[in-house]
Amino acid sequence: MKQWHNWCLLGTVVFLAVFGGPMIINWLYQSNSGYITIWGAAEVFSYYGTILAAILAAIVAVVGVHISIRASHEQYREDKRRDVLPYFAINMLDSKRIDPADRKDEAANDTVQTPDQNILVYQEFPLDKNYFIFCNNEINWNRPLSREQNDIEKTEYRAVISGDSLTLAQPAKYAPFEIRNVGKGCAINAIITVSSTSKELISNSIPISVPSGERIYVGLLVYPEDDFIGTYDIKIGFCDIYDNKYIQQKSLTIVKHKQFYVVTADKETTHEWVH
């Protein structure tokens, strides 16, 4: 508001100087009321014009310098922002699965039963691993996977008990992703979001900070349910050290080919500076 008043005052002064000065000089010469000068009217107008031109040139120079300094400061802030700008490369990983038939043969040949080492044992789980479970028409973020989910991760089959002892294997899908910070700065409070583009299915991870060069592992585990067929977005929202907010996004598609589920990801990753 104060700056607006200053510009109004400057405009008023310029207007009076341009239009008021000649009118006053002309009126003094016309009135012949004691205003005496050794200069003629043309000489006074010429002198006034020279002074006015010099004043206007000085104003233009000052405004130009101000604009130049302001542009320089904005460019400096932009350069500093880019110096600490995080940027994530989202890559879908390839994997080799275990054939469930081989696992059954191995279990039949193993005569020594070893107890589960994860029972009643204190465990810590790193925050750089994120699993999104597509099950029961919901997407849930989880860490870590259960034993059944670990089996699906390794085999892409879900064991289903039918009757008293018959076990069937239903095709499922596990899609691993690596999200690496290839930018120059640390990503603060990075939150991963997986959401459907056509349904009200969404899940978020907890916020973590990802230093430059570090990675986040993301696994999408899709249970054999046709309701999950469709398109989805993987979004990463994060801040730099100056609290500028960014969102990166990659789209993926879940389809069913014959009896198997297939996950494909777009090649491009979009990047948006929120503010």
Image: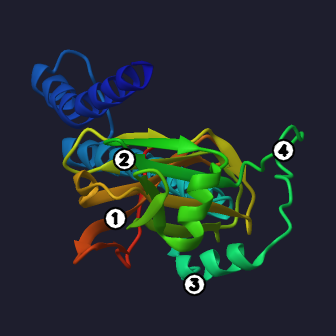
Q: Give the mark nearer the N terminus: 1 vs 4.
A: 4
Q: Secondary structure at mark 4?
A: loop
In the image, what residue type sits under mark 4? Glu
Image quadrant where residue 270 sits:
bottom left
In the image, what residue type sits under mark 2? Leu
Q: Distance of mark 4 from mark 3, alpha carbons?
A: 27 Å
Q: Which residue is mark 4?
A: 124
Residue in view at x 64 percent, y 68 percent = 180
Q: Does residue 71 appear anywhere in the picture? A: yes
Is residue 208 shown left or right of residue 265?
A: right
Residue in view at x 20 percent, y 41 percent = 41
Camera-nearest label, 1 or 4: 4
Q: Does residue 93 appear anywhere in the picture? A: no
Q: Secondary structure at mark 2?
A: helix
Residues 72 and 199: in front is 199
Is residue 192 shown left or right of residue 194?
A: right
Q: Distance of mark 1 from mark 4, alpha carbons?
A: 32 Å
Q: Give the mark nearer the N terminus: 1 vs 2.
A: 2
Q: Give the mark nearer the N terminus: 3 vs 2.
A: 2
Q: Residues within 10 Å of mark 3 (few under 14, many from 20)?
A: few
Q: Which residue is mark 1?
A: 251
Is residue 263 shown left or right of residue 45?
A: right
Q: Which residue is mark 2?
A: 56
Residue 81, horizontal then vertical, whole percent: 61, 56
Q: Which residue is mark 3?
A: 96
In the image, what residue type sits under mark 3? Lys
